[in-house]
Amino acid sequence: MFRPDPALDPFSLNTHVVGSALCCPHCRRRSLMNHESTKLSVAFNGADNTGETTQIDLLARRIGPAAAPAGALHDHDSSAKDATTGFPPAKQVAVILPRPARTAGPWSDNDRLASVLTELVGTRVRVVELQDTDTDLRSLPDRTAFASVLWCQLRALPTAECSRALLDDQGIRVWTGKEADEGAAYSFGHLALRAHAACIVNCPPRAQATMIETVRHLIEEHHVPFHGCEYGLVPLTDGDQRARLLLGGKDVSLRRLAPVLPEVHVDRGHTLTWTAWQDNRAAALRDIRRVYGTSPVIVRSCAVAEDSWERSAAGEYDSVPVTGGGDTLLAQAITKVFASYPAPDAANKVLVQRFLQPVLAAAVVTTRTVSGASYYVAALDSTSGRTDMVTSGTGDHVDTWYVHRDSLERVLENPSAHGLPDFAARVLGAAAQTEDAAGTNRLDTELAITEDGVHLLQVRPLAAGRGRTTDDAQVTAILSAARRTFEDMSVSDNRLLAARPALSCMADWNPAEMLGRRPRPLAISLYRHFITDLSWARQRKEYGYRDLRGVPLMHTLAGHPYIDVRASLASFLPADLGEKQAREVLQAQIARLSQDPDSHDKIEFEIAATCWTPDLSRRTSYLTQSGVSQTTLDNLHDHLLRITRAGIVRLTGDMNDLAQLGLPTEKDTHLDRLEATLERTRRAGQVFAHLARAGFVAVDLLRSLREAGQADRYDDWMRGLGTVTTRMQRDAAEVAAGRLSWETFVDRNRWIRPGTYDLTVPSYGQDPEGYLRPLLEQPYRAEPLCGAPWSPELSHQVTGVLEPLGIDADGAEDFFHKAITAREHGKAVYAAWVSASLETIATLGGTAGLSRDDITHLTIADLLTTPSDTWPATVLRRRAIGAAEAQVELPEVITDTGDLHCFRRGSGRTNFIGTGRVDGRVHAAPAPASPPESGSIIVIESADPGYDWIFAHRPGALVTAYGGANSHMAIRCAELGIPAAIGAGPQSHAACAAADRLVVDCDARRLEVIR
């Protein structure tokens, strides 16, 4: 039992009374009322209120407030109730508070504050402001109208314990805040108020009596019970304590916050308990109809197990709209929602609210990311006219907006300047107001917009990410550095034709697919070393495009790798195209990307023209609309035709170069071979780049023919290609039949590694049982060869349209087959050399006692040029940087510095591969230790050749966040006849990965979350 500090206790009892008087409230009451002759020694701290803030000994108090019973009304009086509040007038409580500060926001309005206090206390509350001369209760008007009074030194809210005392206590109690310097309050029950009224009439006047003097006098002279000193105040200035008090379940949170959200519509709803529903359903239905009549309503879950600070249980229980059908359907809806809870519980409830229709937009807004990072995140549906598409994850057109917390005010001042649509700005503004009122910046809100404004449907603590340490100032500093990096890219470079900067994570060499969105330093440095610093530009110069050697293709901002779209597009302009004409085309292409950022992963199909195709004039018609002259277009077409012809001719030589490279051996992983292995890998990357270009030309030509109806057997032809995956399956069948040894099979595939540049992931050779053994259990059926991707009767047409290339239909089919299979084989050889390089690097790092995970935080330059004794410190420093950068969210496309602070993640334009519709269970992020079931829909972020092992498990379909129509996985799925949604975007990918069941409909070009 704690003892109050004598400085705040209105009296100090002598030793023999303390033992009995402070043991419990009942003993205190008995001691003070029955031992009237006991002499009280009063400790008094001065003549004003300043002494009342002395620290209190709160040794045994509870540290946090307990939640009040949701919606409970302490209705002890059955007399007539107030028409506004529904509470009996006799139970009215007065709360006397200091005047509000000018910056107190919504809490400065006493009427609104009184409404919140009414919800907290459970009876009607009136707020009275302290005057400058107030020292006790003398200035309170109509004291007899109040059942009790709470007199505070600071503007605060009562905890559940304090609220109960205001209804139940007859005497006086002292209340404190959680911290010693948070002031104090005094509650006066009915007996105390009656004694005070008698005191004013009968006792000698006491000029400027302080509250402590008044309390002492009432206890000593009028024998008012004293109930002790307890924690029971939540200062309005303490946001976290305030939020803990206000947020207490779906219904309670809405009712408590509604008064202080004047610009947001809040339907406080009608709460129905499980007990009330079981006791008298007819009465429960009448109560609901009394509130909403016959208007459409929605019955929302309000279970005791959801919407808590530790667990949201979002989406686990039902919400059922009732738009007609009378009480029968309403009763069925209530029963269905209760039935969705895990078990009957008297504390369970449902919340009935008006069903909004029509809805202009609906959104879920969290005031931080699920990891706790400092961004507002608004998932917005402005097309379906429903409120459940966002929460269910089934919406096809949900856009998610990220706004850095420090930037919200600036963004909302001029939303259009940041590309933020009006609906998104309105729900973000409403969420920020809710956050300000609640007191916490960790909220999960559901909102809707109708003709009459923004409606708050739900607010709960953001349980996800709670407890994780985040440094908002560090995120702001990282974004500032990223801004400077982007601004530095604006420095004029003649090779980039003075085009303004534009970055994409999925353009060209697609780092999001190959490395991931937040790769480690080693992976980034290897990708630069092997591809994006030099090899990419050298290959394009040799192919006939502009010479951009010396211009880096990839940059990193806040640890996120991006392709410089200017460099990419400029590198695809023919070398013979004049400077002025090249500038004209490039600026139009950059402008097109800015207008349609969702096309960034399809730049080579929808923006750039990198080779000649029969439909080239149609594809470049937008350039004319952008002001590019016809002369420039004609020259562009002529030069692309020459490049394409030359590319077809050089394919055989590039294939020979690949054959000469061969695959690495164990010797290539020895430390003394490190530099040679790295150089061999870079050479393999150069050869692969040429083969990848030929493969793209082949796919682009096939796309053109297919869209024209001249490749009617495309799907059958693709299934008979016979790439690396098919050969692996054929070898597995040979092992199963005893015609090929297991050791040989493993050795052929030993270098394949999921996540090509990730040293922490085992290669197939390091885990053959997990990766390769399942292949032996799958029957192999060779696909019948299809002579050409077109019917024989279309061969003449194909020859005709491809005549400018100097090849006929047979020559075209030969080129297509060789180019596509050589690209896949080249990727496998290059990946094998990357894997060998990684193993050599692992050996090198091991000499310094570093683990594989440690080594991923070093760069290739660190390993080659710095002393090994400095590596451990570098690892620690890079880990810290990586942890900070992991809290930064960035868009897929950056065309302006404003994009770093406010950006959209849309559903993207998915590349659907194959035909048919698959409905299956989702298996997200498969691994050999948790392989997918046959027929399941595999959902992964990206997939390089190392993920070929998943095909041994016969998936029903595949969904990836990243990847293009010409990506490795797109080719694999087409070859194997597996329906796929490649490059669905991070938003759709997240929804699919979180689903239990999914539909991939390639015919309708649709992804649908079933549950």
Image (cartoon, grey):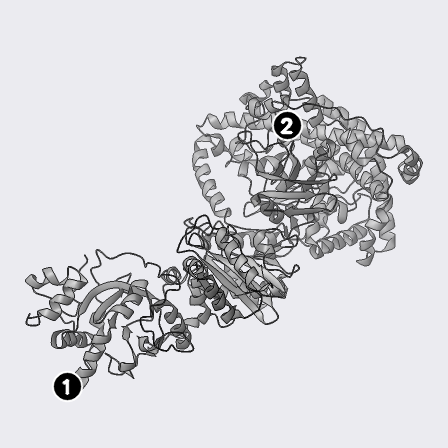
Look at the picture and state if 756 lies above or below 381: above
Q: Quadrant of residue 584?
A: bottom right
Q: Quadrant of the N terminus?
A: bottom left
Which kind of residue does numbered mark 2 sit on? Ala
**Horizontal arrangement in the rendering, residue 544 relative to residue 12 (left or right):** right
The residue located at (46%, 64%) in the rendering is 284
Which kind of residue does numbered mark 1 sit on? Asn
Q: Would residue 149 be seen by someone viewing this image from the given angle?
A: yes
- Looking at the rendered image, the disc whose residue lies closer to the viewer, 1 or 2, is 1
**Horizontal arrangement in the rendering, residue 828 relative to residue 757 (left or right):** right
Q: Would residue 366 be seen by someone viewing this image from the given angle?
A: no
Look at the picture and state if 559 lies above or below 973: below
Quick one: SS at disc 1?
A: helix
Look at the picture and state if 483 lies above or below 170: above
**Horizontal arrangement in the rendering, residue 160 relative to residue 328 (left or right):** left
**Horizontal arrangement in the rendering, residue 369 relative to residue 531 (left or right):** left
The numbered mark at residue 952 is 2
Quick one: SS at disc 2?
A: helix
> Around disc 2, counting alpha carbons within 10 Å, would you say few (fewer than 14), some (14 to 19), or many (20 or more)?
many
Q: Quadrant of residue 953?
A: top right
Can you give x and y, in whole percent of width and height, for residue 30 in the image?
A: 13, 66
The residue located at (65%, 24%) in the rendering is 778
Distance of label 1 from label 2 (alpha carbons): 95 Å
Q: For the image shown, how many numbered marks are present on the structure?
A: 2
Can you give x and y, in whole percent of width and height, for residue 272 in the image?
A: 45, 62
The numbered mark at residue 202 is 1
**Sequence-first disc among 1 and 2:** 1
Can you give x and y, in whole percent of width and height, for residue 430 in the image?
A: 52, 66
